[in-house]
Image (tube, rainbow, N blue to C red):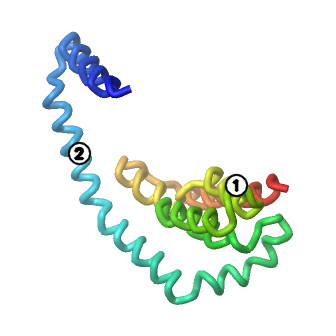
Amino acid sequence: MGLILPLFVLFCLAAGAYRRVPVYDVFLDGARQGVDTAWRILPSLIAMLCAIRAFSACGLMDALCGLIAPALAVAGIPPETLPLMLLRPLSGSASLAMLKTILDRFGPDSRVGLVASVMMGSSETVFYTCGVYLAAAGVKKSRHTVPCALLAWLAGSVAAGLLIA
């Protein structure tokens, strides 16, 4: 198992030599582009993480969960999973931490744990993906990108409640 990375590096070097590609220069260009991209998205990441923390700390998360819990209970979504559902479009790491909290509290085999796991796997960090990856790739967002992505997030979250009986 420990030989996979060295073999991959040797394969890349051999393929580069065969095609007469300056592998090291190409590697450095890719690393430089990665650092440039990280530098460009860093302010957005910091702002998003601060906003998520403030959203939770001020009690707005609990109030919003209490407000939408009755409507989503019809779809079979347990109220304990609502913070995960609300955090998932914003931050993958925050939603992963929330999933861990839910699994520690209720257990992975409980209905709440199963719904939370399916919810985590059937949705995406919509704003992160649209804001960071599309901008970094230079892709122009259409006016339908975020609404369609949010609709897919909602469908995945509701399906989690409906599928886990």
Residue 106, percent across and down?
A: 69, 66
Element type at mark 1: helix
Placement of 67 over or under 124, stated as above or below: below
Element type at mark 2: helix
Which residue appears farthest toward the bottom when viewing the image?
Answer: 58
| Residue labelled with disc 1 | 156
Q: Estimate how packed mark 2 is, as few (under 14), some (14 to 19) or many (20 or more) residues with alpha carbons within 10 Å.
A: few
**114 or 76, which is in the foreground?**
114
- For this view, does 26 lie left or right of residue 48? left
Placement of 163 over or under 65, stated as above or below: above
Which amino acid does the dot numbered 2 rest on?
Gln
Placement of 9 over or under 138, stated as above or below: above
Disc 1 versus disc 2: nearer the observer = 1
Residue 90 seen in the current view: no
Locate the C terminus and report the quarter of the image it occupies.
bottom right
Residue 55, percent across and down?
A: 51, 81
> What residue is at 50 percent from the left and 85 percent from the top?
57
**108 or 8, which is in the foreground?**
108
Q: Estimate how packed mark 1 is, as few (under 14), some (14 to 19) or many (20 or more) residues with alpha carbons within 10 Å.
A: many
Circles 1 and 2, Cβ within 8 Å, touching? The answer is: no
> What residue is at 24 percent from the left and 19 percent from the top?
10
Which residue appears farthest toward the top when viewing the image?
Answer: 18
> What residue is at 82 percent from the left and 71 percent from the top?
73
| Residue labelled with disc 2 | 33
Tell me the distance, in whole angstroms, between the alpha carbons under discs 1 and 2.
Answer: 34 Å
- For this view, does 4 lie left or right of residue 85? left
Residue 37, percent across and down?
A: 28, 52
